[in-house]
Image (tube, rainbow, N blue to C red):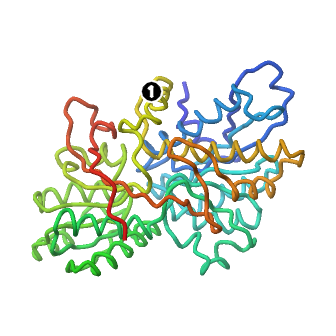
Amino acid sequence: MITRRAAARLAAGSALTAAFTFGSRPGWAADKVVKVGVDLSLTGADAEDADLVLDGIKLAFEGANQGNAVPGYTFELMVLDDGTATAGQYDPAQGATNARKMVSDPAVVAALGPQMSGVGKAMTPILSEGDLATITPSSTNPDITNPKFAAQFDPGGKPIYFRTVTTDAFQGPNMANFMAEKLGIKNVYVLDDSGAYGVGLADAYQKQVDAKGVKVLGRDRLDPKASDYTAILTKVKALSPAAIYYGGVAQAGVKLAKQAYDAMPSVIKAGGDGVYGASFLSGAGFPAANGWYATIASPHLTGGDEKAEQWVKTFTQRYGKAPVDYSITAYDGALVIIDAVKRVAASGKPVTRAAVRDAIQTAKVPTIQGVVSFDKFGDLADRTVSVFQIQENKAGKMDDVTAQYKYIGVAPQS
């Protein structure tokens, strides 16, 4: 039997596309088909989290089709994998290839993803030229939606990169505020993984932590493909830091966690949403992962919020595993696309990419995280950053995010 992840990888590695049609209401085969592209990092270090994001997306479109959310229309997903075995994680070049596949199919009227900002930077110019809007549930690099870089990322002239999370312009600085104000650190060493997300997050963190009067002892860049960070960590240890902050994702992050635990077990360790997730837990393991602080660029909803409680139960029953918060931001992004298609169809206009893009731009959609709306550049109006700490729960599964990440609270905003 071929698993869902294996099917997605096979699709991404060939000329084929993984397409999913959900629902079985009477007469659905006669409906007009609306395709939604999905780009996630289903291969490599972040695959576990990508699966949970994909499940959130699937749950939304299953509900839409079964509930006849847009009369006369059926949604299909074109699922593409931007992870490659060569990269060992996300691969921007593969993301660009996936963007071209989406744009070349006239039935694709909107997209969801990517997870990673490095892929977002590669995909966005292609999507812009194709007038194809996408909603990312987790990509946080602010440059992609910054009007200063519109010529690079928005050559088509209209914003097409929307987010159901805030950006690293808030995630990095707000964590700096938390560590300075709540943890009381006096100095810190900053590391990143050389990717667009990791560098941008670490830059934003470093600028704000310096402004808070915390001494930055140094900054280094990790090679995500390297296996040994001993030389860097030996240098860091000699400086006796109160904390280290890591901007990056799981490929380098899990090796850093293991080796930093061996070198400096008592030093405070923290990062962004790249160290929040099942991939980080299973890759680093315990005791190495224990104690790490992490942020997500959205409100925390999977830990008992009343609006999310029933959804979490439904998700867990459907997929046999607990969701992460970015499963919810992905689900909410899907709700925005469903709403956009519904409004365009109800207006009597053809459901085209341009019409759906315009409808997304003006969205005010009630979702699990609240009413989702975007500014004129595509960024989410809500700027909430949530803080967690990994605290080993031996009663829970090692890679269960809900069990192992303790919610600390909302990070102080700058």
Residue 21 in the image: state x and y as whole percent. 71, 31
Q: In terms of secondary structure, where does tag 1 sit? A: helix
Q: Nearer the viewer, residue 119 or 27?
A: 27
Please tell me how crowded label 1 is: few (under 14), some (14-19), or many (20+) other residues with Cα within 10 Å: some
**In the image, is 14 to the left or to the right of 106?**
left
Residue 111 in the image: state x and y as whole percent. 67, 51
Q: Nearer the viewer, residue 147 or 108?
A: 147
Q: Nearer the viewer, residue 184 or 78?
A: 184
Instruction: Tell me what residue is drawn at x 74 percent, y 54 percent.
Output: 359
Asked which quadrant contains residue 99, the reply is bottom right
**In the image, is 77 to the left or to the right of 227?**
right
Q: Nearer the viewer, residue 124 or 68?
A: 68
The quarter of the picture where the C terminus appears is bottom left
Instruction: Tell me what residue is drawn at x 39 percent, y 47 percent.
Output: 300
Query: Tag 1: residue type?
Result: Lys
Instruction: Tell me what residue is drawn at x 69 percent, y 25 percent.
Output: 66
Residue at image mark 1: 313
Residue 304 vs 161, above or below: the answer is: above
Residue 368 in the image: state x and y as whole percent. 52, 41
The quarter of the picture where the N terminus appears is top right
Residue 43 in the image: state x and y as whole percent. 49, 47
Residue 277 vs 295, above or below: the answer is: above
**In the image, is 350 to the left or to the right of 339?**
right
Q: How many marks?
A: 1
Residue 29 vs 258, above or below: the answer is: above
Instruction: Tell me what residue is drawn at x 50 percent, y 56 percent.
Output: 165
Asked which quadrant contains residue 357, the reply is bottom right
Outermost residue toward the top?
Answer: 26
Residue 197 vs 71, above or below: the answer is: below
